[in-house]
Amino acid sequence: MSKAGITLATADPPAPTARGLPRRRGVELALIVLAVTLSVYGYCAVGLARNGTVPPGAAGYGAGLGVLALVAHLAVRWRAPHADPLPLPIGVLLNGLGLVLIYRLDLEAPGEPAAPAQLIWSTLGVALFTSVVLVLRDHRVLQRYTYLCVTVALVLLTAPILFPAVNGARIWIRVAGFSIQPGEFAKVLLAVFFAAYLAANRGALTYAGRRVWRLQLPTGRVLGPIVAVWLVSVGVLVLERDLGTSLLFFGLFVVMLYVATGRTGWIAVGLLLASLGAVAVGRYEPHVHHRIETWLHPFASIEAGEGPNQLAQSLFAFAEGGILGSGLGLGHSVLIGFAVKSDFILATAGEELGLAGLSAIILLYGLLVERGYRAGLALRDPFGRLLAVGLASLLALQVFVIAGGVTGLIPLTGMAMPFLAQGGSSVVTNWTIVALLVRLSDCARRQGGGGGGR
Amino acid sequence: MTRHIRHAALFCALLLVALLVNAARVQVLHAGDYEANPANRRDAIARYQQPRGDILVAGRPVTGSRDTGEHLRYERTYTEGPLYAPVTGFASQGYGTTLLEHTEDGLLSGAAPLLAPLPRWNELTRSRNAGGDVVTTIDPAAQRAAYEGLRSRKGAVAAVEPSTGRILALVSVPSYDPALLSGNGRTARDAWARLNADPDRPMLNRAVQRTYPPGSTFKVVTAAAALDAGVVKGLDKPTDSPDPYTLPGTTTRLTNGSEGCEDATLREAFVWSCNTVFAGLGVATGVERMKDTARDFGFNDDGLRVPFPVARSTFDTTVDRAQLALSSIGQYNTRATPLQMAMVAAAVAGGGQVREPYLVERTTRAGGGTVSSAGSSPVRRAMHPATALRLRELMRGVVEDGTGKKAAIPGAVVGGKTGTAQHGLGNSGTPYAWFISWAQHDEDMEPKVAVAVVVEDAAANRREISGGGTAAPIARAVMEAVLKS
């Protein structure tokens, strides 16, 4: 990466002045201040609602989040000055809001606080963000590591099989009290791999191969590796019983394939495979079958006299929120019980911030996704475009799968709400995604396309 | 590729729009259903999140709230639980509410819209008002006198103020401590099981929820009907009454416990409680007029609320003449709650007028501002004022010369009527000893109190059980307590 980095660095100065594009760093700073202020306000609102006083840690919390955001901002200002000003503040706001919600849920069961650990993970995440922005001067460098990426991704995905299952899913590695979800990191690596591989082989994928009816089938030679990777990752995930991630990878794969080749045939094949898989797994895998039954009849357990299940409790929480919400710290989403700080964190947002707050959060994700797509459209190199599209779609799909799950739109599958949910691996991964989006948008806006300058 | 990126972007946008639409569905469209689902505990949590308002007796709360720090946070406490249980009822996390705790629940829990400063204010701010207080009409001295008078005997006392209908005492023994049922823990569960399994039924409010055959105390109603109907012209004219009295259309002979009932005057028959005379008077008055008078006193009324519902006191209207004869002496299907019999005494004391009884003087906000106050309660004419005057004379006679001597109070005019009701198959059940009375202090313009006492006691000597022996002293203690205060 050193060589490309240096050449790019020397080529840096003349470009912006030549284009005359506004850098928008001031906007970013203002938005970061707003995001930190909103988070501190939320923190204070929780304390005021619960104890009638501003929580003692408010200043420290605000300062901590502020310093983190500022460090990230300075890194962007220094090494990615043309970057899109939106992704970083959105990340800060969602991360800050997540900390507020976790702190708020900590108050319900003072025995096991999760907010301090989450703050440490957030720090790690921002550190990773900063290092990615500082070290990775050009995203195309990643193309060199295509096969390293996929190997590491597969190792990460496979590793938890060797560790004991937690709550029916083998997706955690527990070392020295810390639990890591390696599948989260694998997401980014797989997105990089898909982007690099598809960018390199899109010609072959698009034009070669036999034509069956109106579908252009690709040749086995190009298709082989990709299907193999996909099968392995999905197979591993079914073994680990983490259906959410499996669904996510599959969706990502189909979207990126479609964007790379422009073949609707891929969508048809994808949907066919997806429905076959869904029917098979839904029918024969008891764990998944149960999830589908719960989705279809969320109140069946109440009628059976067993009390409300987690999905029912989650729906109750959303319903209680109504339009304006009960106010931070005043809801009872803790009734959901297990995973209320991770998979079900959105229910707390829905109950205490209402439909208004929930819509704002979903629109923030939407905005982040939109900025990713915009970078993708602006970039010239296929790898950059595919990577931007892949990362943005990854976010959108993840939000859809988990938010749709807890609101009863689709069957519930365990997955972390990006930035909001408790879970270190997830926070670190999402900061990496934002860092890559910042880098991609910097390239896109600097030269009107990543390849333009060279 | 650009076109396909746009397609993919559109797809992602669709996913997020689907989330928004679904969120609106859950949070707005179906919110009402989900909130009303009985498995949703939020209502219960909100309800116990703040201290409950108090029930006040003579300006002092007899209830309280204890912060447990648990999920359903505030639990109910009672200062003198067993004494006031027939008034307050209980308010339990696990078993709901009864009596005043039930009928005034909205106010006590703070949910009542009346407590809000502006209409729909609470829906908007999602706040709950502090629980209001309920001020009762109970006279603590009378309540205590009744409770201690009954002591360990099963029975009930109801006392009202004739001129207003205010309930001054409402006692049921055996009682229970409603504080035992607060919360939903193990102690509450055990207490609930024990109280429900108890054959003495301590949670039954005998003063309003149970009916007894009123026995001879019902003769007040029969006498009122006969006098109003003109069947009897004067108190001292002999009635044409055989002794024993053969029930019309049967060969069953009705007898008396005392001598001298044959052709007795109404005064004599009332003082010595002649069954034969009143059975005959009832038949002579006729079922229609008996029914009307009983109704005017409050019998056959399903709708009485004080504000909790009072069991219906009955006077059977589909009877033949023999049954009417028995009904007229408080037997057969005639049944009354102690509160109903206190109303009978109050009608005589109040010049023939019956005021509907009530227990809640007023309700207030937590700060003390009045939310509602009991206006003057509805009045019904039970009998002609002249008849009431005559009945006052008859009832005074019972206390001064007859079976109710133990109810006499120096310095006051007291009128009463004893009763001993047989029941059960072949009258094998424990007899109920009744006493109903009213008292007027010599310095007062009108009677201050009307009271009904019923005692059911298997342990006592059968002969000892008579209204005059066991029930009258309790009635006297209650009346004295009211007259003193």
Image (cartoon, rainbow, N blue to C red):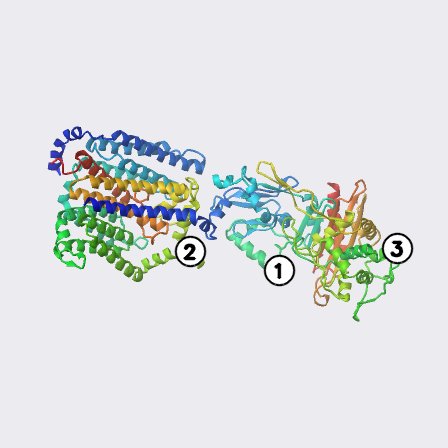
Q: Label 1 vs label 3: CA separation?
A: 47 Å
**Residue A238 vs residue B463: left or right?**
left
Amino acid at the residue labelled 1: Pro
Residue at image location 72% in from the left, 68% down from the top: B426
Amino acid at the residue labelled 2: Phe
Tell me if label 1 and label 3 are in contact, CB under 8 Å. Answer: no
Foreground label between 2 and 1: 2
Q: Mark 2 points at which residue?
A: A299
Q: Mark 1 points at which residue?
A: B199
Secondary structure beneath dot 1 equals loop
| Dots 3 and 2 on the same chain | no
Towards the viewer: A189 or A56: A189
Q: Mark 3 points at which residue?
A: B236
| Dots 1 and 3 on the same chain | yes
Quadrant of res A379? top left
| Dots 2 and 1 on the same chain | no
**Residue A392 vs residue B475: left or right?**
left
Towards the viewer: B255 or A243: A243
Chain bearing tag 2 is A
Secondary structure beneath dot 3 equals loop
Residue at image location 59% in from the left, 44% down from the top: B63
Residue B183 x %, y %: 52, 49
Quadrant of res B444? top right
Q: Label 3 vs label 2: CA separation?
A: 76 Å
Where, quadrant-wise, is the N terminus of chain A in this rendering? top left
